Image (cartoon, rainbow, N blue to C red):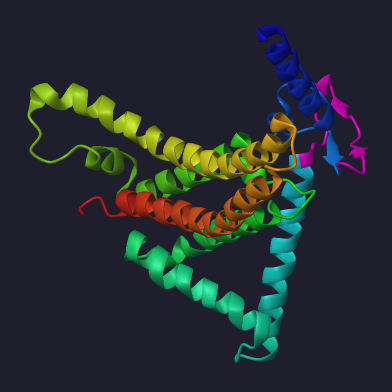
Amino acid sequence: MTTAAGADSLTAADSLNHASGGGSDWILHHIMDGNYLDFEPFGKIYLPHLELFGIDISITRHVVFLWFVALILIVTLFSVSKRYKKSLVPTGFVNFIEIIIVFVKDEIVKPTVGKGYEKFLPYLLTVFFFILFSNFIGLVPFSATVTSNIAVTASLAALTFITTQIGGISTHGFVGYFKGLIPHGMPVPLLPLIIVVEILGLFTKPFALCIRLFANMIAGHVVILSLIGLIFIMETVVIAPVSVAFALFIYLLEILIALIQAYIFTMLSGLFIGMAVHQEH
C-alpha cells in the first residue's frame, strides 16, 4: 500500500510538471523574469540576446513590459495635457484622470510633505501612476507584473531615497540636514549609538518600500497559481470549481491590492520626504 501511495504521488507530481512545462519550480517559472514573452499554451516568443563589451544587456520580459507601461503612461498623460490646452473643463477620461491627480495631491502629497509640497508633486504623481499602471497591466493575461521584480521596486525606492536626501539638503544645507537627524537634548554618551541608528534609518526606509511593494505584488500571483495547481496535484476535476472560485476571488482582491500598493508607496515616499524637509516636526 505504501508503494502504491508513493507511485500515485509521483504520478501526480509528474502530471503537474508535465502540465506546467516541467520542473518543480513551475510557479516561479511563470512569475520570474525571462528572455521570452510567455503565451502558454499557445507558445513563446523569444527575445534577442544582446551583449556589449561582454556584458549581457539582453531585453527580458519585464523590460518589455516596463517600456510598455512607460509608453502608456506618457501617451495617457500627454493626451490629457493636450486636452486641457483645448478646454479647461474636463470631460470623460480626462475628468477621471483629473480626479486621481487631485486625490493624490490633496489626500497624499499635501498632508505628508506639508509646506513646499509643490516641487515634489511631479515625482510623486509619476510614481503613483507608474505603480498603478504596472500593477493593472500585470493582471492582464499573458502580461507580466514589473513591480513583482525586486530590481524595479529597488529602483523606485532608490529614487525616493535620492529625492528625500536632495529635499532635506536643499532645505537645511548639507551640515544642517544631517545635524537635524539627531534629536535635540540627546545626552553626549548616547550620541555614537544614535548617529548609527539614524544613518541606518536613512537606508531602512527605502528598503521597506522596496520589499513591501515587491512582496505584495508577487504574493498574489503565487497564491493564484498555487490554487490552480491544486487541480493537477489532486488529479481530479472535482476540485476544479473550488480552485477556480478561490483563484478568481484572489484575482479580484489583486485589483484592490494594485490600488492600495500604489497609494501606500506614494504616501510613504511623501512622508519620508516631509520628514527630511520639515525636521522640526
Residue under the point 12% across and 41% down: 184
Per the rendered image, the range of residues in magenta is: 40-61
From this view, report whether residue 253 is shown above or below residue 2. below
In the image, taking residue 65 as reference, residue 170 lies left or right, namely left
Q: Does the magenta stretch include residue 42?
A: yes
Q: Is residue 227 magenta?
A: no
Q: Position of residue 174 (x, y in %)?
A: 34, 41
Q: Which residue lies furthest to the top in this view?
A: 3
Residue 55, picture quadrant: top right
Residue under the point 70% across and 43% down: 238
Q: How many numbered marks, from 0 up?
A: 0
Q: Which residue lies furthest to the front in this view?
A: 1
Q: Position of residue 177 (x, y in %)?
A: 30, 43
Q: Position of residue 269 (x, y in %)?
A: 43, 51
**Main secondary structure along the magenta-highlighted residues:** loop
Residue 155, picture quadrant: top right
Q: Position of residue 78 (x, y in %)?
A: 70, 71
Residue 7, picture quadrant: top right
